[in-house]
Amino acid sequence: MTRFGIPGYRPEWLEGRTALTAAHGRRLAALAGRVLAHVWLLWDLDDGTWFADAPVLLDFGSERVAVDHQKFGDLCITWNVIDPAAPVDYPDFRLAWRPEPLPGLAELRGRGLKAVEFLEWWPPERPAAAPWGTVDVGFDLSPGWLTVFNALDENGIRHEPPGPEWRRFKVDG
């Protein structure tokens, strides 16, 4: 079974930075130096809005990485599975992939990736040892930035680097 009618997309959900680093750290770190060709989002053709439940697809030419959040702490990262040219067949919605359909995304196209970071929200009032659960993925495209974050059972996008309330972990494999 595919998710949201995306051909070939069968997510394997992981939780926590340690599991994500073990499964994807080396490959994410190897993206450094590559140029971002496109950020693809699944678009609801009837509403003219981003279908934020579906993965965010970052196209680095020979590598396409999809980032997808669900529930509170589940994160799936897949590699070279999603073809944005392939039709999406989801009975509840008319969906299609669109490159850079939201403000701020087009400015990232053509930028070189400096690093990937896993991000954990850690406000000052939070105890140092308290587990939180959500892990977001930040892409340093200096001077640009893209974070794909858990927007509580869907994906969200931010364009500014994380502030002091975030713990940042550079992915180095």
Image (cartoon, helix red, strand yellow):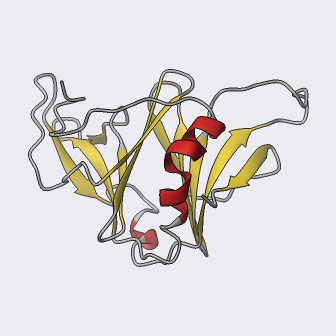
Q: Quadrant of residue 3?
A: top left
Total residue callouts: 0
The residue nearer to you, when weighing 26 against 156, is 26
Considering the image in quadrants, where does the N terminus appear? top left
Residue 11 pos. (x, y %) = 34, 33
Q: Viewed as shown, does residue 147 lie left or right of 92?
A: right
Question: On the rendered structure, is 30 left or right of 35?
Answer: right
Q: Which residue lies at the image location 90% right of the left edge and 26% below the top edge? A: 127
Image position, residue 31 (x, y; %): 48, 67
| Residue 117 vertical placement versus 111 (above, below) | above
When the figure is inspected, residue 143 is found, relative to residue 69, above or below; the finding is below
Q: Residue at x 18, y 53 (%)?
A: 83
Closer-to-camera residue (13/121): 13
Against 138, residue 107 (above or below) is: below
Q: Which corner quadrant of the image does residue 134 belong to?
A: top right
Along the horizontal axis of the image, is 162 left or right of 19?
right
In front of the other: 167 or 152: 167
Give residue 49's position: percent from left, percent from top.
Answer: 30, 41
Quadrant for the C terminus, please. bottom right
Residue 95 coordinates in the image, percent (x, y): 17, 39
Asked if residue 160 lies left or right of residue 43, the reply is right
For the point 51% across and 78% down, the residue is: 33
